[in-house]
Amino acid sequence: MNFATALTVGFALALSSPCNAAQCTHSCSSEFVNNCVPFQNQGYEVCRDEIDGANMPMPLSNAGCVAGCQDTDKMAATKDDNGDTTTCSLGAEAFVANEQGSPITLCSEQICSLWSGRGTTACKVLMDVPSTCTGAAGQKCPLIFFFHGAGGQNSMWVNSVGPDIHDGTNDFIGIYPQGVDNQWNTGSQSGAVSEVDDVAFVVSIKNDILKKYFSWDGSFFAYGHSNGAALANKLAANGVGFHGIAAAASQLIQTPESSADPAGSSYLYNTIPNPVAQLIPMLSLHGDSDGTIPYDGGVLFGGPYVLYSEADSQRIYADLNGCTSDETYSETTVPAVTDSGVTSTATKYTYDACNVVGYKVSGGDHGVANSIDGKAITKVAMEFFKDVDGVVSSEVLTEDHSADDGAANGLSGVSFGAIFAALITALSLLNQ
């Protein structure tokens, strides 16, 4: 039997075998023990998920692993030795690089314990660390949170932005969270998703990174598409300490100014200005032919939410960042290829003095563009973040909302702003 035939048989067995039907093969055990657990810095539970398909899109099929197979003794031993390698313990842990296509699962035990209501998949956060951020170098590497659109998955970023993360020219670490039911609660959702506090979830991820990587003091950025862009705007509106956002195919909400759900949340603001929004660089990317989220705004999906136009949304961010006059405003035209593959142009709107940039793609639909000025739109966002990194770091305070992290689980919380030294002191007290 050749390898291809054996692999096909293995897949057939994986689909037909009941849970724990047979012991994992020697090759599967070797891959699990020698490569998955130590190399990816993950631990037993995450690698077990990769066999069973609960975490990554594909199990460890390259080693002939069958979903549900019983642990060998060597595999079981890693549970005792490495079962806590994905918790966020306070300490001076350094970032460890992963290979492109094999992201690390961040602090899965701690985050999934706190956010058990999200389910076994939507509580897990993937982290993509390039070799340029290994060890001490990682202390200054900015983190970019990438938020998928409605119906998307965090695994999509592994291949779409992962190559740029790992191309050797960037010092960005990619953070890929997952939305419940493949969407984010940005205020306009109904049903079970409206009860999910996604802003608090993102804040808890930030806090866990600060706890685990004790000496890290880089910047936090957020990129989102569509529903994910709406979440990026909501992070900015609620002033949770990000140093810049990029929103593709969605703009600020005009009304209502705040949401009623989720009950008890500290993060209900939908728009700017409000009492908590802080100075924040902003990039918008949108197609003028978007039939899902129109460039000119208006009523969202039949109401009651109403969106600003992109022009008004950019102006609001410019005002927030101190541009009180249109004298700082300029327009240029750059080449673009629409999301349908048509050669076109994009108008670039720049508020020079306050780090607000917008691209309006002529003929671009909801996917915005295949490229703008020769670059993928995620690459445009990364270059924007590189330009503004550190510009407002001293003015945007990192907040500890660790008491708010459990809001979705019925816990009350009080947020307090702090400079970084005070944050570390607070975290130390919390972990004594």
Image: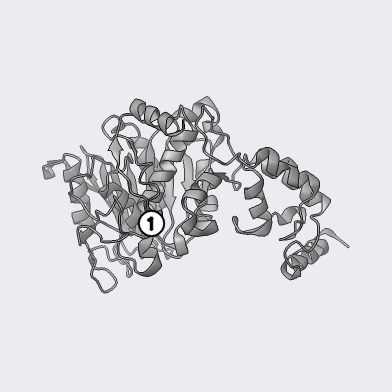
The N terminus sits in image quarter? bottom right
Establish if 294 lies above or below 174: below
Viewer-side residue, 332 vs 181: 181
Determine the residue located farthest toward the bottom in the rendered image: 302
| Residue at 18% over, 45% down | 275
| Residue at 16% over, 39% down | 322
Determine the residue located farthest toward the right in the rendered image: 1
> Circle 1: is it few (<14), some (14-19), or many (20+) Cα within 10 Å?
many
| Residue at 75% over, 46% down | 75
Question: For residue 197, what is the image quadrant?
Answer: bottom left
**Is residue 395 visible from the viewing direction of this image?**
yes
Left of 376 or right of it: where is 286?
Answer: left
| Dot 1: element | helix
Establish if 395 lies above or below 286: above
Viewer-side residue, 137 vs 196: 196
Mark 1 residue type: Gly
Q: Where is residue 383 in the image (x, y as percent from the top left)?
A: 39, 41
Establish if 346 lies above or below 418: below
Residue located beneath label 1 in the image: 228
Q: Position of residue 4 (x, y in %)?
A: 80, 61
Q: Position of residue 367 (x, y in %)?
A: 40, 62
Q: Where is residue 163 in the image (x, y as percent from the top left)?
A: 54, 46
Question: For residue 216, what is the image quadrant?
Answer: top left
Left of 416 or right of it: where is 320?
Answer: left
Left of 81 or right of it: where is 414?
Answer: left
**Is residue 217 visible from the viewing direction of this image?**
no
Question: For residue 74, what is the image quadrant?
Answer: top right
